[in-house]
Structure formats: C-alpha cells, structure tokens
Image: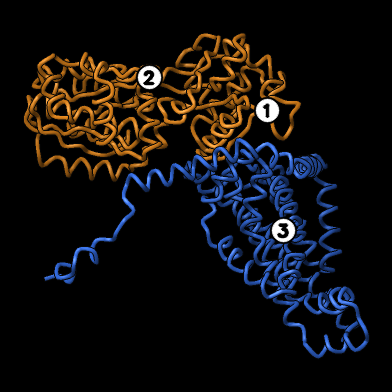
Amino acid sequence: MKKLMTGLTVAGAIFAATSLMTTTASAACGEIKMAEFNWASGELLANVDKIILEKGYGCTVELVVGGTTAIFASMNEKGVPHIAGEQWVNALRETLDPALKEGRLHAINKGPITGLGEGWWIPEFTAKAHPELKTALDILDHPELFPDSEDPSKGAFVGCPAGWGCQHVNNSLFRAFEMEKKGWVLVDPGSAAGLDGSIAKANERKQNWFGYYWSPTSIIGKYNMQPVPFGVEFAGADHWNSCIVKEDCPDPKKTSWIKSEVYTIVTDEFKKSGGEINDYLAKRVYPGPIMGEMLVYMADNQAAGPDAAIEFLTKHEAVWTKWVSPEVAAKVKGSL
Amino acid sequence: MALSDSLPKVLTKFPEMGRADLRDFKKGIDETFRSFTRTYGEGIEDFFYPLKIFMVWFEKLLVGTPWPLMIIVLAILVYIGSRSWGLVVGTIASLLLIGYLGMWTDTMKTLALVSVSTFVCIAIGIPLGILMSKSNRVQAVIVPILDIMQTIPAFVYLIPVLMLLGIGKVPGLIAVCIYAIPPVVRLTNLGIRLVDKDVLEAADAFGASPRQKMFSVQLPLALPNLFAGVNQTIMMALAMVVVASLIGAQGLGSNVLKAVNNQYLTLGFMNGLAIVAIAIVFDRVSQKFGQRLQKHSEVVHG
C-alpha cells in the first residue's frame, strides 16, 4: 500500500542521492540527514526525531522528503540519508535483506509503531453490538449484518480500489474464504476517496461496514475502526508471494494478512558513530492508538509535521520521556 | 527597489482571514454537512431507491442477455435510429471486437450506466429547458447554476455525493448527470427562444393554446438545437465514465483507473477506445435520428 503513496520515481531517487552526496556523514552529533516520508505518520515521526535529536542531543538535523523507494535507494547506494524512521519494508525485501546481511544498513528498530498493517476492519459500534463476531470467520457467516446497498440479500465486503496491489490480495482471499458461496459480494470502491468515503458514511450513519484498510491512518483513528483477526494462521510467505498477491491464482489458501514490517533503518556509518542516539532510536516505539490520535489531529487541523510534532511532545510526555534519559527529556521539555 | 517595498504593508500582504479562523470556518461547514448527512442521508437514499433498483435491474439485463442476442438488438436499434446500413455494420464490428478483446461485460455495464444517465438527464433537462425559455427570471437563475455544474472540478462534488449516497451506481449516475445535463438544458432553452416570432404570431392568430403552441410549434421547430443538446449530453456522459468509476460505478472506467494506477498502457487504450466506440455509435445514431425528425417536421410545418 505504501508503495502507492510514495510516488517518487527512480529518477527522483537518483536526484535526491546526488544532491545529498555533497555533504558526507558526520554523525555523533554533527549534521544528520534524516528521511521524512511523505505521508502523515512519516512526517510526524521524522519531525519528533528532529526535535529530540536537536534539542536533546545537540545535533543538527536536516530532513529529506521522499517516498519508500526513493529514500531506500538513496540510503542503500549513497549512504544518505542516515536515518529512515518509518521504512515499510515488505516491498523492499529483495534489496534490503542483502544490505542488512552485508552490514551496509541496520534495522535498529523493528517496530517503531505498534499495531500497524493492512487487513480487514469493522467499525467500533459493530464490534460492540456483536461481540460474537470475534474473527473474520465469524463475520463471514453473517452476510446479513452487512447488506450490500445494491443487492441487500448479499453481504458487502469492501475491497481495494481497482489497480492497487492489494486488489489481487483481496480477490484471492475472497476466493480462499469462499465468500461468494457464503453470500458476499466484493465491492470495488473505485479510489482511495471512494474507500474513505464509504467508511466515513458508514460511521456517520451507524451502518455496519466490513472491508479492507490499513493502519496507522487518520480514518482508522478517527472512527476507531477495529481490526478483525482472520481466525486462521498465516499460510507462509511462499504461498503469499506466489499466489495470494497474484492475479487469478488458481488455488488460494485461507490465510491471515502478511505482517507488514516497518523498520527504523540507519546506515552503517551512522550506527558506528551515533552512540546514544542509537539507543534512542531503538527505544522509540509509538503505541498504535496514540499514533492514530495524532493522525486524526493532523487531519482535523490540517497540521503539518512540525506542528504535529510539538503537539505530540507537549500532549504525550508520558510516552516519549521513556525513550530518553531524564537529562535529555529535561532539555527537550525546556525547548518547547 | 521592488514596487512592493514602496507600498504600505496592507497593499502587499493580503488581509487574510487568519489560520485559526479559517480552520474553524472549514470545520464548521464540514460538521454542519456531516450532521445533515446523519439526519437526511437515509431519506435521500430512500428517494433514489427506485432508481437504484432500476439501474441494478437494467445492468443485470444487459450483462445477462446472451451476446449474440444483444448484438442483434443493438443493431436493430441502431438501424431504427439511423436507417444507415453502414452504421449498423460498424456497430456490429466494433461490438464483436470489444467482445473478442474481453471487454464485453464491462462494456455492457458502461452502456447501462450511460443509457440510464442520459435518460435521466434528458427527462430532467428538457422540461427544465422549456421552463427556462418561458421565463427570463428562471433563465437568470439557472444559467449561472449550469455554469457552475459544467466547470466545477468533478472531484469536488464527489465528496458530498459520497457522504450522502456512498459508493455505487446511483452516486455514479449523479456525478455523471451533474456534468452532462447542462447542454440539453441550454440548447432546449436556446432552440425554443430562437423560434421565429412570426411563426408564433401565426399560431396565436389560429387560436392555439399555450400548450398547443409549445408542443406543436415551438418544440418541433426547436428540434435541431434540442438534438444537438441531447447529443452533447450523451458525449459528456461517456466522458464522465472514468470519474464515475472513482466512486465505485463499475465498467470500462474502472479498467482505465486500474491502467492508470499501474501504467498498463494497452489496457488503458483498449478500454479507452471501447468508450470511444460506444460514443461514436451513440453520436452518429442520435445525429441521424435528429436529422430525420427535422425532415418530418419540415414536411408538417414547413
């Protein structure tokens, strides 16, 4: 999914890389180049890191805006930026794994945000009204609770917009769970706006809704959508990559969604010279609900990364002060 | 020294509303609209329910009809409309090609959406045009609204349509009609207003009632313009197919979106050209039909 939102092309990556090459790394708190991913949680994460590193550790931080592929290509090839806070790695496995193995890059934090990933969701009021719906398997037995507006005798499962990578996944799972036989239709919302709109409409009108989304996102946070456990085991990365993600896979098996892995990645050079900053990056874990709340704040107030970072640091002291030593925390607090 | 340096600050810096006020202003309207959808959304959805049932039924009919029968029916319709064998052959050939390239079902879905949309647009548009032609005041109100409908970016009105009606066929139809209805309204109005004053005087002299004047004199004489309007409405409805599929109206449009999202060049062009093929058929048939109607009216009134 994140692939979609990160529209930078390879050309952009090379441009970013060459323009960064002029200043070489001088960590241990001189100048640090940090990636700022171009989606809301990425912006927040980068800006919080920037404030803490600058005010708490006395670094100079320059943010480099980009998408997953561009930033990763630049880090991998040129060694800059030095830190990527919220790197979605599922799509990068083939290039990332060798880089980690060779020690060019290090995954210093293998989960900077908890509870994140793709999957199936229902609104909070649906979950409360029907506590018996514990897993996707339970929901699939009750299509009548989620009537399709165009054919109310069927249940509506809102899948991915046409052309997104996850469209194939939802198609495969739709067949694997034999949803058609159980009385479901797979609804194509057409676009991100259509998908968001259908969730917003369902929540405003208190209509049941069942479909695909991902977290951390403001819409999940805003309506407190509940992730639905699949009720089956993950069928393995091999099956996932060779069948579930493909169009027209002949025999998809029931499986839960692949775990979305997000790492904080640093370059080797940074890791060697970064000292205590490495400890901070390793400890820095945002609880999912707090991240959700921040994303709602950003969407509601149309706040950019820097504003949101200050909001986070003032509102959620209990969260971030655990990531740093008391002295550093005091310095950061003093600067706000 | 730049000009802006020598001017007082109030002239160089626009007196803006202020960030916080602007935010509250936007949030206030959003919130009002949200509570509106909570209160009336259900009712509005119920209002469109018959239309939804009809669209679902019509799409099922087109998709469910065996393809040879569908082609025969369409060929007959094209012949009745145009009386042109060339056009009939062209229609059959393009439908066969569309089917052969695996786009039959999607084309039928698009055809269903566009036919129903056009029908709804005409059913609302012509009476509205007649009303406009009768009163300058009504015209003064409706023309700016039509201007807005034609120029406002479609994405803007997709948001309220989505919140009120969700995703699917009816919101798709509404999105299509907002964009496609203006030409038929404008040209009906224009056609009636352009009818010769002498002809109307003659009708008055014969003691025609206003109703007779409208249906036997003004409308028949307005037909060339009126049909130009219908034709434009159909074309614009087809052009909106892709936008309608952004809110879940299935058909060729969703394949175009899929192609755009993945840089599938061939898929994009195939589906785009299928839309073009339908458009050309609709265009030629409606033009020929319009021309024939005018011939008849010339015999009667000329």
> What chain is tagged by disc 3?
B
Q: Looking at the picture, which amino acid does disc 2 mark?
A: Gly
Which color has been applied to chain B in this rendered view?
blue
Which color has been applied to chain A in this rendered view?
orange
Q: Are marks 2 and 3 on the same chain?
A: no
Element marked by disc 2: helix
Q: Position of residue A229 (x, y in %)?
A: 52, 13
Q: Are marks 2 and 1 on the same chain?
A: yes
> What chain is tagged by disc 1?
A
In this figure, what is the number of numbered marks? 3
Report the mark closest to the observer, 3 or 1.
3
The CA span between labels 2 and 1 is 31 Å
Q: Position of residue A134 (x, y in %)?
A: 57, 10
Residue picked out by circle 1:
A185
Figure quadrant of residue A274: top left
Q: Which mark is residue A288?
A: 2
Q: Looking at the picture, which amino acid does disc 1 mark?
A: Val
Nearest the eye: A225 or A16: A225
- Mark 1 Cα shell of 10 Å, populated few (<14), some (14-19), many (≥20): many
Q: Is residue B59 left or right of residue A202?
A: right
Q: Residue at x 42, y 17 (%)?
A: A259
Q: Earlier in the sequence, mark 2 or mark 1?
A: 1
Q: Looking at the picture, which amino acid does disc 3 mark?
A: Cys
Q: Residue at x 21, y 23 (%)?
A: A105
